[in-house]
Every structure is written in C-alpha cells, then in structure tokens.
Amino acid sequence: MNYPKADHSLIKKAHDFIKKHPMGVLSTVANDKPWGAAIYYVADDDFNFFFVTRAKTEKFKNIDHNPFVSLTIADPETQTTVQASGAISKVPSKDIIDIVFKKLASIRPKDDINWLPPVIKVHQGDWMILKLTPNYAQFAEYQELKSDINDSYIKQIV
C-alpha cells in the first residue's frame, strides 16, 4: 500500500511496534456510552487489524450499533503508541483459517512456552473474526526529547 503521509522508515517502525505489541484497547460507542475492551489482534501490511470476539460481548453489541471504532496500542517503557480509527467489518469465512490459525494462534509472549493464545480459549458458539480498516492511523514516540518546539511527536501513517 502507498502511504503518502509517512516515509518508509516510519512505516517499518510502526509495523515492528505493532508486531511486538499484540494487545490493545478497542474503543466503541453506542447510545452515547463509550466502552473500552482489551483485545489481542494481528495486523497486515496495510494496517488492517483482525481480532476475535463473540456476538454477546458489549464491544460487539456496540459495533453492531455503530461500526466506527478506535484502537490504541501503547508501550509505557518506550513511550510509544499507535492509534487507529475506522470501520469494523466481518471477515469472510474463506479468510478465517488463514487469520485465526496462522496469525492469531501465533501470538505468544517471548519465552513463555505455557502461554495459550486467546483464540484457543474462545468456546464454541457465536464467535467471529472482525477487521478494523483504519481511515486514519498515527504513530508516536515520546521517549526522545525534540529540540524543535514545532516538531510533532505524532506522525500520521494512514
């Protein structure tokens, strides 16, 4: 994908950050009530985010009412964040095997052989894979002090 707002090195840094931080907070709103839910996700090269949920969760009920969401991924140690906003869609069944079993099932903290991926813990029933397609995303690194007061820490990536 072409990223007119960001240079190649920034895109690579954002992708590397996302791959190392597979959990974020998905924010939804329905009936003027905000809701945040921690989710495990995987992302593709175009900054689309995929995650599993059940139809009876508060987040899915909100998404069903209003498909526009935001996702925030943060690392307090490096003071780095990725934020994305856009619309949620259901993943077609033909794509589920690749996303669930090859990508979501591979999420594992470093050196933790006993850790089970969240997708394995989803019980039989009304679960589905959803996709966040951002119309806006940004990457920020706050750890390094900027000498130019007009230089922003926030860089648009989508």
Image (cartoon, rainbow, N blue to C red):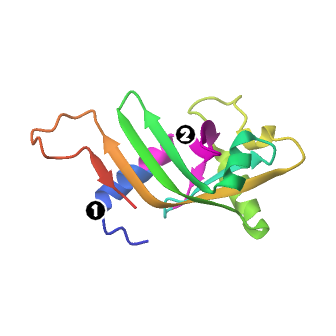
Left/right of residue 2 with respect to residue 65 in the rendered view: left
* Callout 2: SS: strand
Left/right of residue 77 with respect to residue 153 in the rendered view: right
Q: Name the residue nearer the viewer: 110 or 39.
A: 39
The CA span between labels 2 and 1 is 24 Å
Magenta-colored stretch includes residue 147:
no
Give the x, y percent position of residue 18: 48, 47
Q: Decide whether the magenta segment is chiefly helix, strand or loop.
A: strand
Q: Name the residue nearer the viewer: 158 or 104.
A: 158
The amino acid type, in three-letter code, at marker 2 is: Gly
Which image quadrant: the N terminus?
A: bottom left
User: Furthest residue to the front?
Assistant: 31
**Marks 2 and 1 close (CB-CB < 8 Å):** no
Which image quadrant: the C terminus?
A: bottom left
Span colored in magenta: 16-44
* Callout 1: SS: loop
- Residue drawn at 36 percent across, 67 percent down: 3
Give the x, y percent position of residue 31: 65, 45
Q: Which mark is residue 24?
A: 2
One can see residue 131 in this view? yes
Residue behind mark 1? 7
The amino acid type, in three-letter code, at marker 1 is: Asp
- Residue drawn at 21 percent across, 46 percent down: 152
Query: Which of pointers 2 and 1 lies earlier in the amino acid sequence?
Result: 1
Q: Name the residue nearer the viewer: 119 or 150.
A: 150
